[in-house]
Amino acid sequence: MIFQLTKRMLMETDKRLLFKFAYNFGWKGIGAVRAFDRRVRKGEQFPAFLFLSITNNCNLKCQGCWVTPSVPALELATADIENVIDTCKRHGSYFFGIMGGEPLLYKGLFDLIGKHPDCYFLIFTNGTLLTDEVAREMRRLGNVTPLVSVEGTADVSDVRRGGSDVYSHAMHALENCSRNRLITGVATSVCKSNFKDLASEKFVNELIAKKVHYLWYYIYRPVGRIPHPELTLDRNEILELRKFIVNTRTTAPIAIVDSYWDHLGRALCPAATGIGYHVNPAGYLEFCPPIQYAKENIRDGNLSELVKKSEFLAGFRKMASSSSRGCILLENPVLMAKFIVDQKAINTSGRCAGIEELEAMKCCASHHQPGEEIPEKHWAYRMAKKYWFFGFGAYG
């Protein structure tokens, strides 16, 4: 599998992009995690990675999306993003996930990326705006990878994404990426309506044929204006998804990504470790994108000091890691709501519902299933997760 994936990368991608990926993302990413580990051991905090939602503007209306578009669109100022990136680099962190809304609607995005050739950027996109021209610009920059969202077959995608011909647009986006020899990823949020289509050998093989190099599986979370809780996976489906991921990693020449399990198959929550945080379009510093509450804003001071002194972030890490290894938003939204109220946190969603959304959520299954752990089978994933992934004593 490793040999075949390596061969694919060498044959299908621009060699300059491969070097940027290996050095900016791979080598520097390992260094960022090691630096994070050292900070944790000394009782200090600063994330190894940061996710930036640069705009709440979007051209789709997806089920379970936490983003609430506004008129005019809410966007992070370029100067604020620059300050955040510079602060992260001083702490040895060079990887940034660029989110939205739809980040390709943000004017000046590629100018911003071009100013930081020593960093690596992952753009979460629905693919509808990923034209050949955009793909060519990504190739020119070299330090960026597109992660295109695919939510099932053509019919299911239109329902899930709240648009028309969304699937075909995503496929065209992948063709544009392939034509320009980009390192390309696909992300999918697995729910009841797309489970059989996406957690399948057929789907994986189709992506490989389209020269996709990594596939990132998410577990659907019923949040936002149109949460659709009926789409939430049950315990057996989550366990089936885990088995599929572990088994596929041993055979398919494509990198399979998750952010839910360690090398032993134990559940984890990245936000509970503090390894990564999220900045929303208004500048608020959040533990993760779907939980839209905060007490700090990057416009109020230096990011390093905000993280270091935040009782809110520290309180969440303690509460989340002591209550479960899984997703507290799914497992115990009432406890999450109580924590938010006790902390007097600000509703950063842009919606009036606020805490009522959390209190109305029902407890759902998450990836924490004690006694059902499935360790990684492939040595490469086992080693990568053990030495360069999450954990770091967050769960005692």
Image: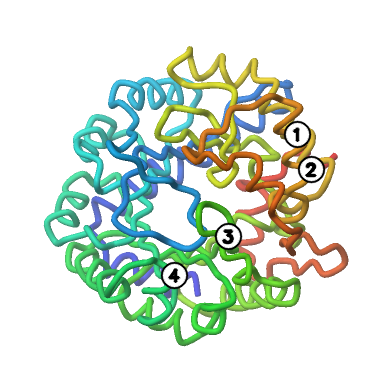
Q: CA distance from mark 4 to mark 3?
A: 21 Å
Indicate which disc residue 335 carries: 2
Above/below status of 304 relative to 66:
above
Residue kind at label 4, given as amino acid type? Arg
Residue kind at label 2, given as amino acid type? Leu
Which x, y percent locates residue 320? 76, 41
Which x, y percent locates residue 108? 20, 36
Name the residue beneath numbered marker 4: 160
Name the residue beneath numbered marker 1: 339
Q: Are marks 4 and 2 in contact (CB under 8 Å)?
A: no
Element type at marker 3?
A: loop
Q: State the quadrant of the C terminus.
A: top right
Name the residue beneath numbered marker 3: 258
Which x, y percent locates residue 210? 30, 76
Q: CA distance from mark 3 to mark 2?
A: 25 Å
Instruction: Name which residue lies at 42% across and 34% down.
Output: 94
Element type at marker 2?
A: helix
In the rendered structure, the answer to whether residue 103 lies left or right of residue 84 reads left
Residue 364 versus residue 201: which sits nearer the camera? 364
Which x, y percent locates residue 375? 74, 66
Q: Residues within 10 Å of mark 2 (few under 14, many from 20)?
A: some
Q: Are marks 2 and 1 in contact (CB under 8 Å)?
A: yes
Q: CA distance from mark 2 to mark 1?
A: 6 Å
Above/below status of 244 relative to 114:
below
Above/below status of 385 relative to 114:
below
Mark 3 or mark 2, earlier in chain:
3
